[in-house]
Amino acid sequence: MRNGDETAVILPPKPLPVSVAASLRTLSIFAGAVALAVVVHLIASKNEPPLETRFYTIFLCSVLVIALITAPSQIFWPRLRRWRQTLHPILAATALLLCLWEVVTSGVRLLPLPYFPGPAKVLHSLITDRMLLFDSTWHSLILLLSGYALGVIAGLITGLCIGWSPPVRYWGMPLLKVVGPIPATAWIPLAMVVSPSALISAVALIALAVWFPVTMLTASGISNTRASYLDVARTLGAGRGYLIFRVAVPAALPNIFIGLFMGLGASFLTLVVAETVGVKSGLGWYLSWAQGWAEYGKVFATLVIMAAFFSTIMTALFKVRDRMLVWQKGVIKW
Amino acid sequence: MVMTTDAEGSTLQLRDVRKSFPDPGDPINRRLVLPGISVTLAAGELVSLIGPSGCGKSTLLRLIAGLDFPDSGELLVDGQSIPGPSAERGLVFQDPNLFPWLTVRRNIEAGLAARGVLQQKRSEVKEFMRLVGLEAFADAYPHHLSGGMAQRVALARALINHPKVLLLDEPLGALDAFTRMRMQDEVLRLWQNRRTTMLLVTHDIDEAIYMSDRIIILTQRPGTIEQIIPIALDRPRDRSSSDFLSLRSEILELLHFAGNRSSQVTA
């Protein structure tokens, strides 16, 4: 009787079968790329002080060893094989890119020094100054998270009020539309005068940068809740609390997450600017300090750390979204 | 009209219910949708509402649900006037309107959760899932369901609150012909179990004859009651019996769709 209905349930796609022959191709591509990088490095670093290039040599060699070991062991370990199978083009491309970077900088000196150091120099700075870099990352993390959390909480509350209540919308929306688009960094001169400490004003500025997109998207999500969902909930006996927090908020959640992502991007920008001009710690501060001493190896090391730092936080937010919006799976892809 | 002593349903009484809406093209005049409807549904009765598009059928259901208020007139459930929406009057739309962020189980629970009685009545959830045959899909999300399944969840969600009146706004309108006939039997089975008073808006004359105790035919807007036709056939009804077919042609005649009279339609 329910035949037609049952087939409507979508099954997850089966993983593609991976052959051993294909896995050996993986070995040749990635390991070959790394081997090429090692050779290029050894040639290019002949003129460099060996102390500065030592770490990079060790790094490349250990990657090569890992590539050589994982290639045969994946025959016995299917999970590793699948993982390598999907990642090996990217890994190989990364190795080739490092290789190219080394050729252009340390190799043929196409780019002016000291502004464009080679990968060996950057890795050397990264390792020798690791304590200070770690400390700076830690301070940035604390500052970023406190500002972001504050902005998100404030944005959710104001967004909810504006989205749900027409009077609040009437008064709040014009204010939001006029004040909101001002970049948070434009408030720096004022923040420096008003706030007792640079740290507090930085937290406030990051919160402000996050608050605007979160408020905007939350408000629009809440006010665009399908009227029929609310009607249905009312005929089920729902009170106001249920209508707001169990119907409007979940219905607005996809929108709210767009706001959270926009806010996160704005918070990175504000964090780095605030640390560069006022706060005496963090990655932004380290970056401008290294630039002041013309230590471009350290500048690039900071950029590497920032890339890892910010993308990790972004990935964490994606994970949270995937968990909370699991019901959208298969409906929307973004 | 069939009535049993254990009916969950209530009587539903409409007295001269009038409703108009602001006309978007004409700010001075209001558009009259219902000029004054009076009708009474007995407890446990299943009544269909048929009429041309825009005649105010859905408006009438919204008024009974308490989602809208009439300009004048009275709506009474068991003699009490309707103060606003409540779990006593369930509403099922053509679009199942399941909450897409909740699983099937949680959608069915929503009726209890909204009233804050989920803890006490959790045991009923299973029973209702069995009633509509969805135990196997308890943890599926709505976008995985077919139209018929989704509508069954919507029915279970409305019924779990044991409404005294169930309002059905073309609930089967979006389904294919076979699923639709199967669902008609399912709604009838639910109705026979619980004796909920049901008011069913439909465009399908066969569906109205097959299911209801009485059929109310509304005129073009402003909607007034053109005729109320009692259906005295025994259940289960045979869609191809001669009585069924003669009722069908009678109603088609009333709606001015009968063959050679269609040219005489008056506005």
Image (cartoon, coloured by chain):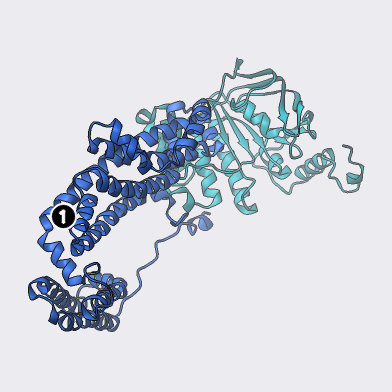
- The image position of residue A76, as x and y in percent, is 19, 76
Q: Pointer 1 indicates a residue of which chain?
A: A
Q: Secondary structure at mark 1?
A: helix
Q: Is residue B234 above or below residue A292?
A: above
Residue in the picture at 90% in, 44% down: B261
Colour in which chain B is drawn: cyan
Residue identifier under label 1: A133
- The image position of residue A135, as x and y in percent, is 14, 50
Residue in the picture at 17% in, 71% down: A120
**Left/right of residue A156 with respect to residue B94 in the rendered view:** left
Q: Nearer the viewer, residue A114 or A24?
A: A114
Question: Mark 1, residues whose alpha carbon is within 10 Å: few (<14), some, or many (≥20)?
Answer: many
- The image position of residue A71, as x and y in percent, is 20, 78
The image quarter in which residue B184 lies: top right
Residue B230 showing in the rendered view: no
The image quarter in which residue A122 lies: bottom left
**Left/right of residue A73 with respect to residue B12 in the rendered view:** left
Q: Amino acid at mark 1?
A: Leu
Chain identifier for the blue-coloured part of the image: A
